[in-house]
Image (cartoon, rainbow, N blue to C red):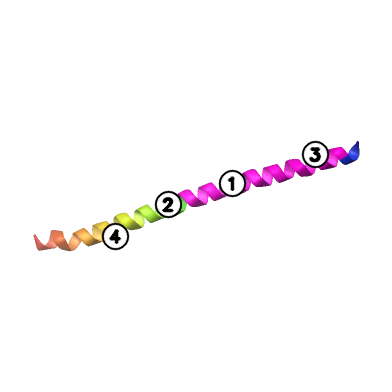
Amino acid sequence: MQRWILVAVIAGLHLVAFAIGLYLRRRRRRRAEAARAARSAEAARAAAAPRRAQR
């Protein structure tokens, strides 16, 4: 009986660790996409700036 409880606890801990890993990976990917979007917007602004100055 005790062995089954131990197996259940270990399996539960693995599931919790897996869920935390998925959550952190999703969060990291969202941050990377936001940073990439900000960089491309900055690059677009920088590319447009000289054109504005010429007018």
Amino acid identity at mark 2? Glu
Instruction: Using the image, determine if residue 51 lies above or below residue 22.
Output: below
Amino acid identity at mark 3? Ala
As measured in the structure, the alpha-carbon distance from the residue carrying label 1 to the one carrying label 3 is 21 Å
Amino acid identity at mark 1? Leu
| Extent of the magenta region | 4-30
Badge number at residue 33: 2
Quadrant of the image occupied by residue 36: bottom left
What residue is pinned by disc 3?
A: 8
Question: Looking at the picture, how far across and down is residue 49, in whole percent?
Answer: 19, 60
Label 1 Cα neighbours within 10 Å, binned few <14 / some 14-19 / many ≥20: few
As measured in the structure, the alpha-carbon distance from the residue carrying label 1 to the one carrying label 2 is 17 Å
Badge number at residue 22: 1
**Looking at the image, is mark 2 or mark 3 earlier in the sequence?**
3
What residue is pinned by disc 4?
A: 43
Q: Does the magenta segment cover residue 19?
A: yes
Quadrant of the image occupied by residue 5: top right
Kindly state the secondary structure of the residue where label 4 is placed: helix
